Amino acid sequence: MKKLLLAIVFLPAVALAAEAGYRLDRAPIDPKDLVSLQAGARTFVNYCLNCHGAQYMRYNRLGDLGLTEAQIRDNLMFAAEKVGETMTVAMTVKDGKAWFGVPPPDLSVIARARGADWLYTYLRTFYRDENTPSGWNNKVFPNVAMPHALWKVQEDAASPVAYDRTVRDLVNFLVYLGEPAALQRKSIGIVVLFVLGVLFVFAYAMKKAFWKDVR
């Protein structure tokens, strides 16, 4: 666990020199778009969860996206038996290092570590390169060990715009994955500020009434 957390923290720094200066495209994500989040969840479990886990996320939290337990169990659970389980994979760190040179990082907080714009640009800038072990390379992260996991999706997409939409949905879900309670937290924050504003009015009125006879 400790090694995994260190890998997540220091992975961005390791590749910083290679990525510096590349212009990132703005990720058109919308944390309130449930259709996009559901589509992103499908892409994640089908194409990412084979190698990357999300060990801090439980399948039943996908209910926050408007999915029923039956929908989660029947359509999104390929590596677990109970909806209360975390989204882990069978691949070990040792296997990942043997196959890719480095173990694939856990994606629970990848959007918070990298940023949505970085992920959106990264997933759209893979290109063929016969000089790399995987046969792929990336403009944002040169010589990355990861192959282009979405190459078939990109190849079958009706247009570049359609593929960009798939990536947008996936990144949208990865952002949600990093903080599932973000929308609830923001909503609660707005309510708290409103309550504090009302209390301020009463406190100010009380203060004036208390000090009105003091000279």
Image (cartoon, rainbow, N blue to C red):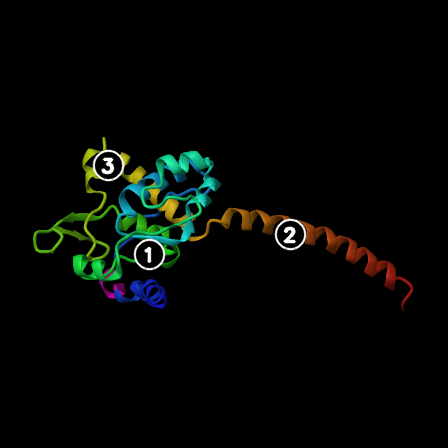
Which x, y percent locates residue 174? Answer: 37, 48
Which x, y percent locates residue 187? Answer: 57, 47
Q: What element carries label 2?
A: helix
Looking at the picture, which amino acid does disc 3 mark? Pro
Residues in magenta?
Answer: 15-19
Disc number at residue 160? Answer: 3
Neighbours of disc 2 within 10 Å: few (<14), some (14-19), many (20+): few
The residue lying at 37 percent from left, 35 percent from top is 74
Q: Do the residues labelled 2 and 1 touch (CB within 8 Å)?
A: no
The residue lying at 78 percent from left, 54 percent from top is 202
Residue corresponding to mark 1:
106
Give how far apart the Cα atoms at labels 2 and 1 are: 34 Å
Quarter of the image where one finds residue 14: bottom left
Q: Is mark 1 on a helix, strand or loop?
A: loop
Closer to the observer: label 2 or label 1? 1
Q: Is residue 115 magenta?
A: no
For the stretch drawn in magenta, the main secondary structure is helix
Give how far apart the Cα atoms at labels 1 and 3 are: 28 Å
Looking at the picture, which amino acid does disc 1 mark? Asp
Which residue is situated farthest in the left direction here? 130
Q: What element carries label 3?
A: helix
> Going from the N terminus, do you reach mark 2 or mark 1 first?
1
Q: Is residue 31 left or right of residue 130?
A: right
Residue corresponding to mark 2:
192
> Going from the N terminus, do you reach mark 1 or mark 3 first?
1
